[in-house]
Image (spheres, helix red, strand yellow):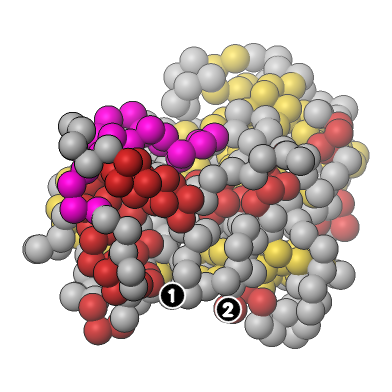
């Protein structure tokens, strides 16, 4: 039988057993302990005798948090509501962030040691089937995701107030998924700003699972700004993008694979200080779907299938094949600019337009390092690129992940060039 990945409860039990077995040994804990293939060898630490009650476990687990930074957010989610102190859990200004008074950011930090899929009060196991993500699935409508890049604001400060929401999302006419989302959709909203703009971001968690936000366009201390928050709490931070390009954002709460794989991702497009040539601009976010069988009219995301790396579907902007049925339409003579972000969580996207070539593809931050005459370019999971072509002849041009084992699972659409 294939070994399953370890759960946080197993790791905590292994740590406690180790301490009980060697009460006199060194209490230091190695920094390199991670939750990957098995419980790490954690050296004994005084004061962690096996708890006899849940209250004892919660009281004593703060000591274990020192060995496993990030466990605090999960434990807080299991604590009685009266135990929460305050609502704004982080503030930031001028590109820095600070924890709220009285809080130790190490205990709430999002990292690979915080397994938020193991919540004692939320029995969803290794799936995304939390209560909010499964309710009302039958009445959830299908809606296209608009790929058009939103215009830049005249303001140089962009204020974003978003919610982490666990809701059903219909991705095809006959498929509804139990999604973890930013602002109720997969992917989340497209963000558009300039190099040097100020982004003031607040995330409020309305879900039962801890969530967080990681902007790839930010340079900021992730231990504080990208920290997890439990239901009803918020985190706020500020940053200024230094580089132009197509960047991913995603929930960084561990296991990160589960949170990205369940729908918590999107694109932030950072335009250069000097405008690029006029173009029709579109944003494509590729992602993968790893789904369990339908139950109650909804398919939940399956963590074990994510680990297998064999997706059921792939999609541009959350809906497989949506731009086959409803193509992107432009005119002859238009310059088209695709901002492509590959949110994975695992596979690359070999981006290609059938019957065309990209006259310009930017290897780095636009407009620097342009490459001419590109047929196909691989965008890794977690990466983004900018592709341009001049539509000088009419026709129907498929845009596709040329890794066709994935392209034929849904990451395909049509660019229709009309006279």
Residue contact between numbered discs 2 and 1, judged by CB atoms under 8 Å: yes
| Magenta stretch bounds | 29-48
Q: Is residue 322 above or below residue 277?
A: below
Considering depth in this image, is 211 or 343 the residue closer to the camera? 211
Label 2 SS: helix
Considering depth in this image, is 256 or 52 the residue closer to the camera? 52
Placement of the C terminus among the 4 image quadrants: top right
Q: Which residue is mark 1?
A: 206
Tell whether 11 sits left or right of 303: left
Q: Is residue 262 above or below residue 406?
A: below
Tell whether 328 sits left or right of 24: right
Q: Is residue 36 above or below residue 160?
A: above
Q: Which residue is mark 2?
A: 132
The image's mark for residue 360 is: none
- Can I make out residue 349 in this image? yes
x and y percentages locating residue 124 in the rendered image: 60, 68
Mark 1 is surrounded, within 10 Å at the Cα level, by few (under 14), some (14 to 19) or many (20 or more) other residues, namely: some
Considering depth in this image, is 140 or 197 the residue closer to the camera? 140
Write the residue at 86% across / 70% down: 174
Label 1 SS: loop
x and y percentages locating residue 96 in the rendered image: 17, 46
Work out whether mark 2 precedes mark 1 in sequence or the reverse, and give the earlier one: 2
Write the residue at 81% across / 37% down: 406
Q: Is residue 31 above or below residue 291?
A: above
């Amino acid at each position: 039988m294939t070994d399953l990945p370890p759960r946080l409860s197993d790791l905590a039990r292994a740590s406690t057993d180790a301490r009980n077995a060697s009460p006199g040994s060194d209490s230091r804990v190695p920094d390199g302990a991670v939750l990957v293939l098995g419980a790490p060898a954690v050296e004994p630490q005084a004061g962690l005798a096996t708890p006899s009650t849940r209250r004892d476990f919660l009281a004593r687990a703060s000591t274990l948090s020192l060995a496993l930074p990030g466990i605090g957010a999960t434990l807080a989610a299991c604590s009685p509501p009266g135990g929460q102190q305050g609502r704004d859990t982080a503030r930031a200004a001028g590109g820095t962030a600070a924890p709220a008074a009285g809080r130790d950011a190490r205990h709430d930090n999002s990292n690979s040691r915080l397994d938020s899929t193991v919540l004692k009060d939320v029995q969803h196991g290794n799936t995304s089937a939390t209560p909010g993500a499964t309710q009302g699935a039958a009445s959830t409508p299908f809606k296209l995701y608009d790929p058009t890049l939103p215009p830049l604001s005249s303001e140089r400060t962009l204020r974003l107030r978003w919610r982490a929401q666990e809701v059903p999302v219909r991705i095809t006419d006959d498929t509804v998924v139990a999604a973890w989302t930013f602002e109720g959709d997969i992917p989340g909203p497209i963000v558009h700003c300039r190099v040097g703009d100020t982004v003031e971001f607040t995330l409020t968690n309305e879900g039962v699972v801890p969530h967080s936000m990681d902007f790839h366009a930010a340079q900021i201390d992730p231990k504080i700004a990208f920290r997890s928050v439990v239901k009803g709490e918020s985190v706020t931070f500020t940053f200024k993008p230094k580089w132009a390009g197509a960047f991913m954002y995603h929930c960084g709460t561990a296991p990160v694979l589960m949170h990205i794989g369940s729908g918590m991702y999107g694109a932030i497009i950072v335009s250069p200080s000097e405008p690029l040539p006029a173009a029709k601009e579109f944003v494509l976010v590729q992602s993968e779907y790893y789904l369990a069988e339908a139950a109650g009219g909804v398919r939940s995301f399956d963590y074990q299938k994510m680990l297998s790396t064999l997706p059921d579907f792939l999609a541009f902007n959350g809906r497989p094949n949506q731009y086959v049925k409803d193509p992107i339409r432009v005119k002859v003579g238009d310059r088209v600019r695709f901002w492509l972000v590959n949110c994975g969580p695992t596979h690359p996207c070999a981006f290609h337009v059938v019957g065309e070539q990209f006259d310009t593809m930017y290897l780095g931050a636009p407009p620097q390092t342009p490459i001419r005459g590109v047929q196909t370019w691989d965008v890794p999971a977690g990466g983004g690129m900018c592709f341009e072509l001049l539509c000088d002849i009419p026709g129907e041009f498929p845009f596709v992940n040329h890794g066709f084992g994935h392209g034929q699972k849904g990451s395909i659409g049509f660019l229709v060039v009309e006279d």
